[in-house]
Every structure is written in C-alpha cells, then in structure tokens.
Image: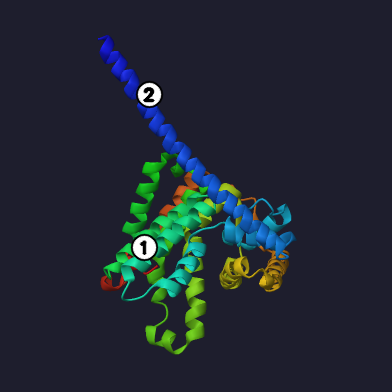
Amino acid sequence: MAERQHWEQDFSTTKEEVYSEETSRLERSKIFFLQKRDRLLQRLSDGGMEGDAYAVVAAMVLGDKSALTKELKEAYSVTGASHVLALSGLHLGIIYMLLSLLVVGRRWKLFSQILVILSIWAFVFLVGMSVSVLRSAIMLSVYALLSLGNRQRMSVNTLAFTAMVMLMASPRSLFDVGFQMSFMAVFSILIWLPMFDRIFKPHYLQDHRLVKWLWGLMSVSLAAQIGVAPLIAYYFGRFSTYFLLTNLIVVPGATLILWLALVVLFVPSLAYLLLYMVNGLNHVLSGMAAWPGASIDGLHPTLLQVSMMYVIILSFWLLIRRTSPAKEWKPSKVRW
C-alpha cells in the first residue's frame, strides 16, 4: 500500500513537472515573440513614425494598441472603422495573399502552402495571439490545406470546425466579445454574400470592373454589419450610420498601409510615405466622425431583444432563400 502511494505521488509529481515545463516553453515563446515585436515597434519609431500615425500602424500591423488615444479610438468607433485597428481576418487575409504571391508555385505547392501557414502562425505569436487572430489563423490554415486538393475552401462547416477547436482549447472564449463578433461576422458573410452576388449579373460585373470592385467591398461590409450590428448595440450601445462609406475608404487604406508597413520594417527610409498615408486616413475619419448623424448612440437592447433581432434576420434570410431558386443558394460554397 505504501509502495502504491509512493508511486502515485511520483507519478503526480512527474505530471506537474511536465505540465510546468510545457507551460514555461509556451511562456518563453510568447516572451521571445513579444521581444521581437518590441524591436519592430522601435524600428517604426526610429523611422520617423510618431503620434497618432505610429499608434495606428502599431495597432494595425503588430497588434499593439497601447499608443491609441481616446480621441482616436472614438473617431474610428463613430465611423465604424474600429475593426481595422483590431487584427483579424482582414489583416491576415492581406498577409496570406501577399505571401501566396511571393512563394506559391505549381511545382512546389505543398511546400509553399506549408511555408505560408508557418509564416502566418509566426505572425500570430508575434502579435500576441488574440482571439480574432487565432480564429483567422485556424481558418486560413484549413483554407490552405483544402486548396491543395482543389476542394471547396471556405464554408460554414469550416467556420464551425474552427469554433469547435477554439472552444475545446478555451471554453470561456464563448463569452468573449471578440469571439462572438468575429464568428458572427464571418458567418453572416458566408450566408448573405451569395444573395448579394445575385443582385448584379455576372457578365455586367465582368464588363464593369470598377463596379465589381466597389460592390465587392460594399456587399462584404453589409453582410458583416448584419451579423454584428445587434452585438455592437448590446455591448457598445452604438450604430455607425456611415459604415458602408467608411469601409470603402478604410479597407483599401488598411491594405495599402499594411503592405507599406511591411516594406518600411525592412526599409525604414520609406517611413515618410507611410506617415503621410496614415495621417491622411486619420484626418478623413476624424472629419467623418464630426458629420451630423455619424452614429446613433444610447442603444441598450436587452439580451432578449438581441436574440429577437437575430431571429428576424435569420427568418428574413430563410424567406429569401425559399422564394429564390434552390440551385442558386449554396452558402456553404462561398469563396473566402
């Protein structure tokens, strides 16, 4: 009996040591990447980035929001542009596209996709592993792996699989605001985008590339807003009325800023271009925030009212789906 107790005590101690070792490895990895991030932030500062411009680039590129002022946050919030300050699928999608253009080749497709995925996850560690970044990284990883077999890449099933993985790792994430808004935005895009794509005929969009580009931005923004508007009203008591116009400005702007920021990290002498671009974006959004009716504030729906909003939205979607040809409605086949 004494030997058994001694063995159980040794086994318990061994498990604690292993757990402690694994935890310390993870912590050391986080510290390592945070140190690298601090060096990159210092490089931006040394290149001439300062003030609100530095704050926006630090948040948009490296996930550091510590330099954002209250006034700057408010301007982005009122105009509905806060999502570009929080690293998410938009940012990782831009980086994935850039990496794919640089390394993906037909002969070495498996190797190139693995390299892209590893680079994406290195970036996730670098920016602090927030919920929205983790969600995007998991989905992009699945997207990349499915693309190897030329299968459907992004679907509601992929989104559900990502949610299951994250909730298994951290069940408390279900009650995280970022988790809820992130998944609801992507889910809404996946189910609403096919409907919006049918508003214009394909051949018309092919002949009018500018209309195609503008409608693509507007439809994705509208689909995402449908999904998150009730949650924004519930948690933040606000609805941004100019969100469509805002996204026509900030999404292309964020893309250019992110690409140029990556260049500036290696060529600091080009920081002045980034500075002009970010200051211009901040100036435009600050002006829009001062427009009359830029946002509807003081919204305080109850949890029951929020639930009813989603019931109405889903009912409306089902109504449109039932009154439209079934063969044209395949939300699970939406391309990411």
Q: The C terminus lies in which quarter of the figure?
A: bottom left
Residue 229 or residue 92, whichever sits in front? 92
Q: Are marks 1 and 2 in contact (CB under 8 Å)?
A: no
Image coords of residue 24 (percent x, y):
47, 37
Relative to residue 173, is residue 39 drawn left or right? right
Amino acid type, mark 2: Thr
Vertical order, 186 against 335 (above or below): above
**Helix, strand or loop at disc 2?**
helix
Q: Is residue 74 above or below residue 14?
A: below
Q: Residue at x 50, y 41 (%)?
A: 27
Which amino acid, mark 1?
Answer: Ile
Residue under pointer 1: 114
Q: Which residue is mark 2?
A: 13
Viewer-nearest residue: 260 or 295: 260
Residue at (26, 15) in percent of width and height: 4
Can you tell which quarter of the image residue 244 is in?
Answer: bottom right
Q: CA distance from mark 1 to mark 2?
A: 37 Å
Residue extending farthest to the bottom is 207
